[in-house]
Image (spheres, rainbow, N blue to C red):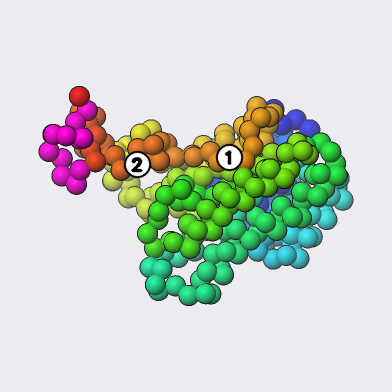
Amino acid sequence: MLDGKTAVVTGGAGGIGRSIAETFAEYGAKVVIADKDAPRCDETVSAICGRGGAAEAQVVDVEKREDVEALTKAVVDKFGSIDVLVNNVGHYVEAKPFVSTDETDWEALYSVNLKHVLRCCRSFVPYMITAGRGGSVINISTIEAFRGIPNCAAYSAFNAGITAFTRSLALELGKDKIRVNAIAPETTDTLQVPLDYMLSPENREREKFWTPLERFGKPDDAAGCAVFLASDLSAWVTGTTIHLDGGAMAAGGFYRVHDGEGRWTNMPVVTGAGTDRDD
Ligand SMILES: NC(=O)c1ccc[n+]([C@@H]2O[C@H](COP(=O)([O-])OP(=O)(O)OC[C@H]3O[C@@H](n4cnc5c(N)ncnc54)[C@H](O)[C@@H]3O)[C@@H](O)[C@H]2O)c1
């Protein structure tokens, strides 16, 4: 599905980005991994090439303008342009009450969540336009761009910025057949959010009560959405966000009851009456 396409994946050596990079290569893309962790870059490229895929890495910090300029030059010198850009880097940095945060915190969150998305698009998209082959930009945000997250208010705001940027850039680039979409994951087991730390193994079976699809996310879940958005399967999809959340947004405040009967509740105490009934 991605034969002959060249893809750049930022943060492509770990977590969701690595799974996207590996899966793109399995579907035939030439992948450029743009990650600041050199050993992880080497390991990811070896893993992909060891399976017969095509990958190379550039050690870059997308928070640095000169690094993104160097990345763009290296990629354009080698491939002419790219077909797919995945802006995957992002981090909540530190959870703390908004009233305890200051301008330094906000600048850091802006830098790692939103500014580099603009920077990478500004750097690569002109080459995509000139190449005239169309293309796909995929921005990774978070489900918390669409719902609240306590103690991460600025993180949530900058990710909501990705939603708005994605919509608006999609309008500008439609005439060039460059589609711009986003993926908004719910909790996914990665380096940044290790499930064994977040939910101890002895409590892991409780995750089935948390989302309608009865589990948290795996990096491969994001990779599946990314392949869809990168390929012609999504040829008429632009300006939108996939909620990659196992149904969490659809459930809103409803949760499964731990009673073995599959009942649901939206009550702090389960009474067997009203909206917590499933019959
Ligand atoms: N894991 C989750 O539960 C979750 C939930 C919602 C949204 N997200 C979003 O998904 C995206 C990926 O998250 P993840 O959990 O896979 O992350 P991760 O921390 O597991 O992996 C991130 C990768 O990006 C690289 N990286 C970090 N900063 C970089 C920089 N400045 N320049 C280049 N490379 C950099 C790291 O070296 C690492 O390889 C992020 O945007 C994150 O906000 C993740």
Residue 120 location (% of width, % of height):
71, 55
Q: Which residue is mark 2?
A: 252
Give the camera-side residue of 43 and 168: 168
Residue 138 location (% of width, % of height):
64, 43
Q: Residue at x 82, y 54 (%)?
A: 74
Q: Which residue is mark 1?
A: 240
Q: Is residue 166 visible?
A: yes
Q: In which quadrant is the C terminus drawn? A: top left
Give the camera-side residue of 79 and 273: 273
Q: Residue at x 81, y 36 (%)?
A: 133
Q: Ligand 1 closer than 8 Å to the CB at disc 1?
A: no
Dot 1 amino acid type: Thr
Dot 2 amino acid type: Gly
Q: In which quadrant is the N terminus drawn? A: top right
> What span is in magenta?
267-278
Marks 1 and 2, the one that precedes in the sequence? 1
Answer with left or right where residue 236 lies relative to residue 158.
Answer: right
Identify whether 61 is placed above or below 200: below
Marks 1 & 2, CB-CB < 8 Å contact: no
Give the camera-side residue of 171 and 69: 171
Q: Is residue 88 visible?
A: no
Q: Which mark is residue 276?
A: none
